Amino acid sequence: MSSETPTTPTAPTAPPAAESARVEREAVRSDEIADQGFLRMVRTTAGRDLGLVIALALLCLVGVVTGGDRFADIDNVMTILRLAAVIGVVSIGMTFVIAGGGIDLSVGAIVALSSVWCTALSTQVMATDSHWSVMALTAVLVGAGCGLVNGLLIAYGGVVPFIATLAMLASARGLAELISDRKTQIVDVPGFREAMSGDLLGVPVLVWIFAIVAALGWVLLNRTTFGRRTLAVGGNAEAARLAGISVKRHTMMLYVLLGACCGIAAIMLVSRTTTGSSTHGTLYELDAIAAVVIGGTLLSGGRGTIVGTVLGVLIFTVLSNIFTLNNLSFSAQSVVKGLIIVVAVLLQQRLARRTSP
């Protein structure tokens, strides 16, 4: 028989104060590490693009729930892509200008002037006698010429971009009205409609043009010296100048590039509507700037993303399509777009403050 006596259990004692403080410090440190990891992820281009993809997926889910089969129909999807193509090309050019520290309020008017000029009677006669591509070349040259004027005024004339492009907005729209006499010009060139309104592998030609412009824009911004200089000029123009970059010439080239994109968008718009009009491109400047900002390009310059801009264009186009399918007014749509822009800018500012050293 054992002689050991049973022991009574003792109540658990509280840990020392020093140990409690150490555990609390470790918990706070873990939270800080997780927060820094999240910031690092958000600060990367991939993290921002992932957020845009999630937002686009949520919008599509809302479209399916509210619009049903009408939204998910393949014809409606092609309509969304076709509508996104024109403003998408303008937005690609706008991405370069904003990433370079500028802004352009005249893109809509340049699109209108290019569409009117390329559908003028004399241009159509030349295109009929030679090739329909004369119209496309005319639109691109007119757009690039307007961009050149903007670039010269801003880079060499010292005019503030907001004022210079605002003047171009009024002038280009007025010139388009004078040329067209405020009338809609019908396209009557053989081969133009067949070439621009067709499709390739089931995808409209306009969508292919947008995809090609976006791909070229991505390569230009991310894989060339021109792109690196654009971000350098937008981030710190004085530092870029001291590094040997001709800031004035580069700034001028950015506006020429955007003007050429407006010319391409004009010929796409003409092919979609088979008309040239001084009313084309109305409010395109707001849609393009909004898509670029939503995409993650900094309004202050120094950072730009083509993928983000494409996703921003798709988000706004899908949003407009949902409003249309549900018979909601254009005014309500504008209010929602405005709120999205404000939220995007506030998030940019908040993220910039948290990531600044």
Image: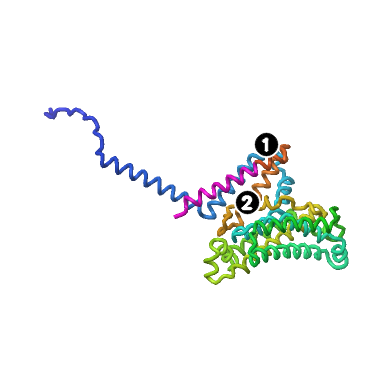
Q: Earlier in the sequence, mark 2 or mark 1?
A: 1
Quick one: which residue is furthest to the left in this view?
3
For residue 124, above or below residue 343: below
Quarter that holds the N terminus: top left
Q: Can residue 150 be seen here? A: yes
* 217 relative to 78, above or below: below
- Which amino acid type corresponds to the residue marked 1 in the rendered image? Thr
Residue range in magenta is: 336-357
Q: Which one is nearer the viewer's eye here, 178 or 340?
A: 178
Provide the secondary structure element on which disc 1 rests. helix
Q: Quadrant of residue 89?
A: bottom right
- Label 2 belongs to which residue? 311
- The count of marks equals 2
Q: Which residue is mark 1?
A: 66
The answer to whether residue 7 is above or below residue 281 is: above
Residue 340: say if magenta. Answer: yes
* In front of the other: 154 or 314: 154
Q: Which of 265 and 83 lies nearest the eye of the viewer?
A: 265
Residue 251: horizontal and vertical position, in percent? 62, 65
Circle 2 Cα neighbour tier, 10 Å, few/some/many (<14 / 14–19 / ≥20):
many
Indicate left or right for 182 with 303 as reference.
Answer: right
The residue at the point 58 percent across, 44 percent down is 343
Q: Position of residue 126 (x, y in %)?
A: 86, 66
In magenta stretch: residue 52:
no
C-alpha gap between disc 2 and disc 1: 22 Å
